[in-house]
Amino acid sequence: MARGTFTVSGRGWVLALGLGGLLSGLTGCSPAEEVAPPAVESQAQRLAAPIGQRISLKACSTQKFVSADQNLTNTALVADRATVQDWEEFQVVDAGGGLIALRAVYSDRYVSADTNLGGQLVANRTSIQDWEKFEWVDLGNNSIALKARSNGLFVSADLDRGASGPLYADRTSADCWESFTVTILGGGGGWVELWRDDFDGTSVNPANWTAITDIHVNSEQQQYTTSPQNIQVSNGTLKLIARNEWNNGYPFTSGRLESAGLREFGHGKVEARIKMPVGPGLWPAFWMLGNNIGQVGWPACGELDIMENVGYADWTSGALHGPGYSGNTPINQRFYPASPVSNWHIYATEFSSQDIKWFIDGVLLKTVTRAEVERYGQWVYDRPFFIILNLAVGGTYPNGTNGATTPYFGVPQSTLDLIRNTPQALEVDWVRFSQWQ
């Protein structure tokens, strides 16, 4: 939660249990109208894309396989390979909204129909934006067409460009040139859930979480407590509640939970279903710290901010903090959920030895590679991390966004009135950890 943003494969540790040890007084550690032919449209509803599966694509026009050969300029896709090797394997990824993305297995890069390249297909993108999204259109007989989200046009292996010509998304309808035979090569593993907390019952599970009360950082205006007025479990959810009441010289009270020494996680997927209060200066966060913080300190331990919000309904942010890229970190980004943050959303990260990814509701929003991080400093994400859930009030990040200095730093009068009239809660339905197996 220091100012900061940012996960798909995970092949590392399982989870560490029962180590003991808490954090106290850590400086800086608290928590971005086109219509296809009718026959195509009617058939498109019959079969779903094989999400998570590795596939090959054979072009009807050339009877050769589509390749993302790394030796090609711009990694342009061509349909000229007689056999399927690594370059000809693609994983089908759920891109949200009924759309898919294709990840070139050999390079771990996404296929893009970049309109700046005239819709030419290249496989060199590290994250999924509109250019990397496609509609999977079933044509029957194990053949499909791909319709690019970027321009609403079908991908074509037009023989007029030559038998080895690049693929373009530039056709308004689908015929043989736009048809590809799909062969499913395998799943390549899958996510296996290893731990979760559903917040059933009437209290926080002490095997999973410790309530922290001695953290005062980032000029935040709250005192964390263990009181049920600030930390509650009821009706299947966790509530961290901010109240306007003086405590230990701070004008607000709230709650913070950490899994340090209890549940610590290596490479994998960490996710939570969360809904948040809205009001400038409220600062809920779902984030992680390296479990060696007691030995090396912050930021050398590494920090992965899965989700932060400073009281605005339409955006959250994520960030990485580590040696050489902490505080006002260059590795950060705002994310825009499909509906207000006061609705339920699933916020997730996947981190491996090679990259870190951020998701909201299953949609990949950001990928940061190890090489990108190492431009700024040491990669410190190859060890177990623990989870933090907290609701701060005011402080440096809210102030940097809303500019409020009165009545409290980072808290405008409207938000003080909001909390005073109705205590505000960060609500968590569940938290879970999975590994790719």
Image (cartoon, rainbow, N blue to C red):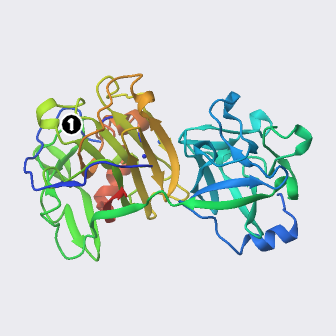
Q: Is residue 48 above or below residue 118?
A: below
Seen in the image, is 389 located left or right of residue 279? left
* Three-letter code for the amino acid on which mark 1 is drawn: Val
Q: Nearer the viewer, residue 115 or 398?
A: 115
Seen in the image, is 101 located left or right of residue 165? left
Q: Which residue is mark 1?
A: 217
Residue 101 in the image, given as x and y percentages of width and height: 62, 52
Report whether residue 323 is seen: yes
Q: Nearer the viewer, residue 290 or 202?
A: 290
Report whether residue 279 is seen: no
Mark 1 falls on what kind of element? loop
Q: Quadrant of the C terminus?
A: bottom left
Seen in the image, is 124 located left or right of residue 237? right
Q: Nearer the viewer, residue 327 or 49?
A: 49
Seen in the image, is 366 located left or right of residue 319? right
Q: Quadrant of the N terminus?
A: top left
In this view, the residue farthest toward the left is 20
Residue 82 in the image, given as x and y percentages of width and height: 72, 47
In this view, the residue farthest toward the front is 82
Residue at image point 44% right, 45% down: 357
